[in-house]
Image (spheres, rainbow, N blue to C red):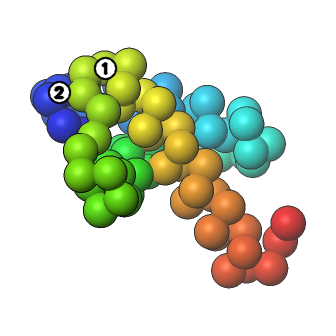
Amino acid sequence: MTGIGWFAAIIVGGLAGWIAEKIMKSDMGLIMNIILGIVGALVANWLLMLIVGSTLGGWFGQLVVGVIGACLLIWVTRMVRGKT
């Protein structure tokens, strides 16, 4: 997560994963929310760098990117498993 430390990345990742869980109506635990939020932010930041050439900075920007990335990961997981 660009521009924030590891401790903040865990907090923002947990929030992003929890928000994505609510948006996608999935049932995950705290640890999975943190993992989804952090990995989702990494994936979304990578995609933003490819498409736009830059990424969003700061806590709020990374929260938004993390939510979008976590939603994408939940969606891809559902597609692979065959659940809609």
In the image, is residue 42 above or below residue 56?
below
Percent from the top left, x then y, of residue 4? 17, 27
Q: Which mark is residue 59?
A: 1
- Residue position marked by numbered label 2 in the rendering: 4
> For residue 62, which quarter of the picture?
top left
Q: What amino acid is labelled 1 in the image?
A: Trp
Percent from the top left, x then y, of residue 33? 52, 41
> For residue 80, which quarter of the picture?
bottom right
Q: Is residue 31 left or right of residue 48?
A: right
Q: What amino acid is labelled 2 in the image?
A: Ile
Percent from the top left, x then y, of residue 50? 29, 62
In the image, is residue 74 above or below residue 18?
below
Residue count near mark 2 (Cα–Cα under 10 Å), binned few <14, some 14–19, many ≥20: some
Q: Is residue 32 visible?
A: no
Which quarter of the rendered picture does the C terminus lie within?
bottom right
Q: Is residue 72 left or right of residue 75?
A: left
The residue positioned 80% from the left and 79% from the top of the image is: 82
Label pair 2/1, CB-CB below 8 angstroms? yes
Viewer-proximal residue, 56 or 12? 56
